[in-house]
Image (cartoon, rainbow, N blue to C red):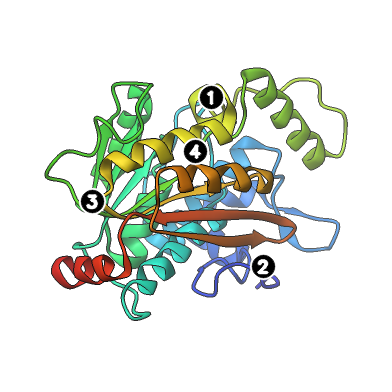
Amino acid sequence: MTEKKANLHERNKHNMGYDFKKLVKTNPELSKFIIINKYDNKSIDFSDPEAVITLNKSLLKHHYGIDNWNIPNGYLCPPIPGRADYIHYLADLLASSNADIIPRGKKIKCLDIGVGANCIYPMIGTKEYDWSFTGSEIAPVAVKSANKVVEYNDLKNIKIKLQKSSKNIFKGIIENKDSFDLTMCNPPFYGSMQEANEGNLRKLNNLKKKNVKRVKKNFGGQSNELWCEGGERRFIDKMITESKDFSSSCLWFTTLVAKKTHLKYIHKSLNRVEAAEVKVIEMSQGNKISRVIAWTFLTKAQQKKWVDTKW
């Protein structure tokens, strides 16, 4: 067993690190990617896309019982422990509206904005808490990929919807009859393709510890996953603006915020739309710190009524 991973949520299955002996037993294909790192521990080369995707397959199968997971070439291959953290902190958020009791079961309905070809959040949320998920996605290829793993694993709690308009976030996805307890999102971080490429190069150089000039188009992420005009700040601002139109359709709206400096502008946007309550939840994995911002248009009394009538 490797050392405990610093700062992961206490319920995170990955907070004791990667047990490569067990993972290889679950997925023997992983064995060919095992290396001994400078700390004399088993690891993989995290700059090798094939090694990372094989590790993900092993983690999903071993910890969550997900088989036949894969993503199309060029789509984002997410780090599983960090994605699981978001889910667990959202469980705590729901508990804050429910006398500190985490609600479980299919009655809890979540919307993942930009579910991606990987479908990570719905799979983990379904397996950990038995919640129901709708995943929205703008790319038909990603929709097809997500549906493939959902169907193969008979994940009846998950449905994937195509977002037909690149201008909309909630519009066209949340219908009049819909009622969501949570929305979640990992928004595009960069403001342009050039920024995204430069960011990927920096990440690769840090992993390889040498000067890499070109990024391989292999599991690094599609343009809509990595960047949008105005970057993270503008995307979240648009999400907040649109959320006002669905104020009675959702208990908690949430999104990841990578840049701390964006929080000041996000709070201004939330004041503009008159959110009733706002929370900032810090998450950290080792030296990396990110945060979730959550807002609701429901007063404490309305939150209680929501819980009493829907849960």
**In the image: residue 187, left or right of residue 100:** right
**SS of the residue under disc 3:** loop
Q: Provide residue 260's location: percent of width, then percent of height.
A: 67, 49
The amino acid marked with disc number 1 is Cys
Residue nearer the viewer, 202 or 232: 232
Residue with the mark numbered 2 = 5
User: Where, quadrant-wise, is the C terminus in this rendering?
Assistant: bottom left
Residue at mark 1 = 228
Give the SS element for disc 2.
loop
What crowding class fits label 1: few (fewer than 14 Cα within 10 Å), some (14-19), or many (20 or more)?
Answer: many
Expressed as whole percent of the image width and height from the top left, the position of residue 168 reads 34, 27
Between marks 2 and 1 in the image, the one whose residue lies nearer the viewer:
1
Mark toward the viewer: 2 or 3? 3
Which mark is in front, 3 or 4? 3
Q: Secondary structure at mark 1?
A: loop
Residue on which disc 4 sits:
236
Q: Earlier in the sequence, mark 3 or mark 4?
A: 4
Tell me: 209 left or right of 280.
right
Give the x, y percent position of residue 193.
62, 19
At 49% from the left and 73% from the top, the residue drawn is 11
- C-alpha gap between disc 4 and disc 1: 11 Å
Q: Residue drawn 58% across and 25% down?
A: 230
26 or 239: which is nearer to us?
239
Residue wearing tag 3: 248
